[in-house]
Image (spheres, rainbow, N blue to C red):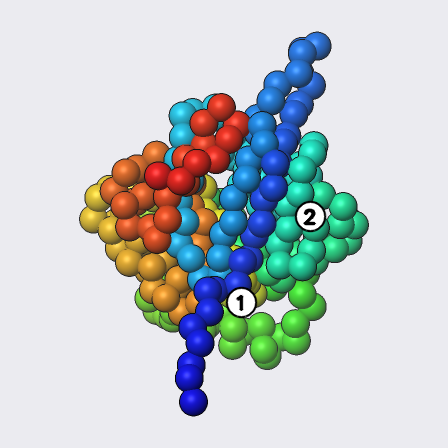
Amino acid sequence: MSIIETEPQALYRLTDVTRTYRTKGRTVTALAGATAEIRAGEFVTIQGPTGGGKSTLLQLLGALDRPSGGSLALGGTELSTASNRELGRLRAEEIGFVFQGFNLIPTLTARENVAMALVPLKIPAEERRARVDESLAHVGLADRGDHLPGELSGGQQQRVAIARAIVKKPRVLLADEPTGNLDEEMRDEILVLLESLCAEGLTLIVVTHDSAVAKRAHRRLRLKNGRLTEV
């Protein structure tokens, strides 16, 4: 019996995606026909000049915004025409977000911050507690659940943010400069963690200015003049 190897399934398909804005009486083009395919389980980085549309692209991939034109599909869902309810479901269930600034609520403990991601899913309390503890253990913070963000280092705060992103068991993790506020040692620790999550099957898409981060990816995309090219 022969075994036929197949390519990983495409998770995102972008075809001639455009995004324009009207500001101060003029039209600004953030994306001008971006085309790419990102497969399930890949670690992909996106680089490009400041103001070149990287954050706009991440918002589109995260179902936080809609394209002005073209096609953008996540799995079998066309994001440009999906209902607001469906986009909300995708954000709640299938997409995790990590940001440079951690975005933790300072008055909540690490455990409570992670649990916030499960509120829209209406998960029973017992299962919610188990998933939160599992996620904190996954990022190496099983003993820090009762600490406030101010009692944690920058690297530990980012680990809490990652635990919050993965507690809902998403298909994709979108990260905007996730190591931008960290020193080299902490950056490398976070990269190892992200790589381990990707090895477990999570699709990882990272916007970064750091070439040391980009070199670790399976694929590197560059966004310039509103268009995507592969490095």
Q: Label 2: state its secondary structure.
A: loop
What distance separates the C-alpha of mark 1 from that of mark 2?
A: 20 Å
Where 218 falls versus 176 (above or below)? below
Residue 124 point in image, percent of width and height: 66, 76
Badge number at residue 79: 2
The residue beneath circle 1 is 169
The residue that appears at 52% across and 63% down in the rendered structure is 9
Whether residue 230 sits left or right of residue 31 in the image: it is left
Is 154 or 7 nearer to us in this picture? 7
Q: Earlier in the sequence, mark 1 or mark 2?
A: 2
Q: Residue furthest left?
A: 185
x and y, in percent, of residue 94 in the image: 60, 60
Question: Is 49 placed left or right of 115 in the picture?
Answer: left
Q: Residue at x 39, y 54 (%)?
A: 43
Q: Tag 1: Cα neighbours inside 10 Å, few (<14), some, or many (≥20)?
A: some
Foreground residue among 98 and 130: 98
Q: Is residue 48 above or below residue 81?
A: above
Q: Residue furthest front?
A: 1
Residue 168 visible in the shown view: yes
Type of the residue with mark 2: Leu
In the image, residue 101 sits, relative to residue 9, either above or below, namely above
Q: Quadrant of the C terminus?
A: top left
Q: How many marks?
A: 2
- For residue 44, the mark is none
Rendering coords of residue 218 (x, y %): 35, 53
Q: Is residue 148 visible?
A: no
